[in-house]
Amino acid sequence: MMDFPRLADFLEELAQNNRREWFEAHRPAYQALRDDFCAFIGEVIERTADFDERVRWKDPKDCLFRIYRDVRFSANKSPYKTTFSAYVSEQNRRGAPPGYYLEVDEKGTLLAAGGVWMPPAEPLARLRTSIAEHPERLQKVLRARGFKKTFGDLQGDDRLKRPPRGYSEDTPLIEYIKRKSFIVWRETDARALTHDGALAYVTDSFRAALPLVDWVRAALEGIGEAD
């Protein structure tokens, strides 16, 4: 069983002692938490597959992010991330495919998200083309009852100040076309959650994000699933 309060406490201690000596001394605690987190992601995948068949055979180990930071080009030389996180998608994470994201951080915040974050230029262009040519498809997502109740709208401030090349301020849904990411998320206190409570919170969030994930898939695959 995933003990979220214990995980949050470990990450808080790691944030205060982010150095190799401390981490190695606490490696058994880290490994036990990571094993439990991997098992939890396996349960998340199993439940998510009930409404999104594409992720059914995903190996939870392939979804986990490493705790080691790449410090080669960073001014911050702290060697470890202070989060446990995972990305659930039928594709490899490379190339920013659409999917579902889960994170617990050192502040004890559990975040559950869905969509696609900062896709490369070519898939981003496809998403923008889909919005311009079929604005009703994205509007259908935004009006979906569970989506609207849970998230309200797309989230995040990563967007262009001006329309991208080939579009104007008069293009339908131009403020969405300016976006660089198409994501939604919600947060709660991980320390207040039991294993089962966290499982319900995450899978309910992923279920609410499904219309957005399906819209991104359809746009990238050039099909009309979002009709």
Image (spheres, helix red, strand yellow):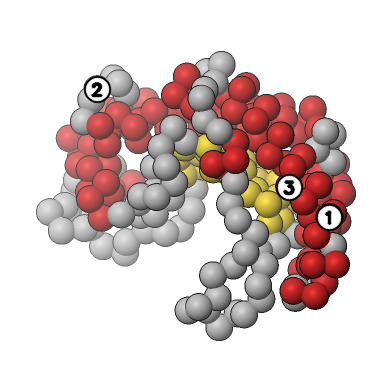
Q: Quadrant of the C terminus?
A: top left
**What SS does tag 3 mark?**
helix
User: Which numbered disc flags the more N-terminal residue, 2 or 3?
Assistant: 3
Q: Give the structural element (helix, strand or loop) at label 1.
A: helix
| Residue 99 visible, this orientation | yes
The spot of residue 46 in percent (x, y) is 61, 22
Which numbered disc, 3 or 1, marks the residue that appears first in the sequence? 1
Q: Residue furthest top?
A: 50
Q: Which residue is mark 2?
A: 224
Mark 2 and mark 1 lie on one chain; the one further toward the N terminus is 1
Q: Determine whether, in the image, residue 31 is placed left or right of residue 192.
A: left
Q: Amino acid at mark 2?
A: Gly
Residue 195 horizontal side relative to residue 218, left or right: right
Percent of width and height locating residue 160: 32, 61
Amino acid type, label 3: Arg
Foreground mark, 3 or 1, reads 1
Q: Which residue is mark 1?
A: 28
The residue positioned 15% from the left and 58% from the top of the image is 165
- Which amino acid is tagged 1? Pro
Q: Nearer the viewer, residue 174 or 73?
A: 73
